Amino acid sequence: MWISPDGKIHKLVIVEGTWGKKPSEQTECEILISKCPESFLEYNNSMVVVGDSDNYVRRTLDLCLSTMNESETAKFKIMPENISFVVTLVHIKFRGYIHTWNAKKKFEIAQEHKERGVTLYKQDRGKDAAYRFVKALKIIHSIPINAETPPDVIDNIPVSDIKKLKANLYNNLASYYLKKGAWQLTIDTCKRVFDYDEDNIKAHYKLAVALIKDRNFERAKNELDIVLAAESDNKAAIEHMKYVKEQLHNAEVKYNLMVKKMFA
């Protein structure tokens, strides 16, 4: 019996496999599944690619497969949902560990995750999209770039393209957090966009909205000033600015009244 450090995965090995490389990102896995909930059955006797996951069931399978050896059969219990199933990892087609990939491969796979995430977001599957964006960020950030003397090109990929992809991924993630109502996460994520694209107007607008929700009207006004300087006819930004100025005016009136009472 093996239990993951976070207590989420409980694994009982039924048949030991061949010791060697375990599945990791982009590994093709031929699997058999039994004694499982109906939602897992569509993956029985199929080939799945670790990391190419668009729902909770597949992400759960990825976590389990990453602990297995080829030809191994194991029973898993997922907590706290108390879901159990038996998996046989029949065969794997190993694609190498992420740290062995060159920048070109990492960039291409991160781009694929981003595009799939955008599709999922348009389907109103924000959480599944966010998983794709986060996975893409982990991969693209694993490309080593010398901070003191950054090159212009790595493995035929312009560093400017790498920065642009990072900015897009953080921007997409900020959209998810904003829609979810996670204002502080939106604020923090927009700041990450500016690490790679300080003039990103969409990120400045999202940051302004999150700051308004967080009732930080002075900072929100600064962000809206940036947006309207670039897009003077942005109707949403104009409406937000009216509201922000009204709130700042009300706060000033209250402050002046308080001071007046103090020294009356």
Image (spheres, rainbow, N blue to C red):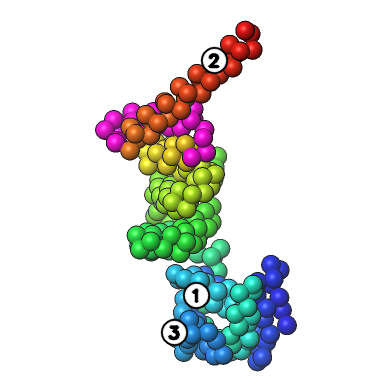
Q: N-terminal of the two: label 3 or label 2?
A: 3
Determine the secondary structure under disc 1.
helix
**Residue 31 counted in the magenta span:** no
Q: Is residue 110 above or below residue 172?
A: below
Q: Residue at x 58, y 85 (%)?
A: 85
Tell me: 189 left or right of 263.
left
Q: Residue at x 38, y 61 (%)?
A: 124
Read off the residue under disc 1.
58
Which residues are drawn in magenta?
213-235
**Residue 223 counted in the magenta span:** yes
Determine the secondary structure under disc 2.
helix
How many residues crowd mark 1 within 10 Å: few (<14), some (14–19), many (20+)?
some
> What is the three-letter code of the residue carrying label 2?
Asn
Locate residue 244: give its quadrant.
Answer: top left
Locate residue 155: give its quadrant.
Answer: bottom left
Q: Is residue 88 above or below residue 235?
A: below
Read off the residue under disc 3.
42
> What is the three-letter code of the residue carrying label 3?
Glu
Q: N-terminal of the two: label 3 or label 1?
A: 3
How many residues crowd mark 3 within 10 Å: few (<14), some (14–19), many (20+)?
few
Q: Residue at x 50, y 19 (%)?
A: 252
Considering depth in this image, is 239 or 54 the residue closer to the camera? 239
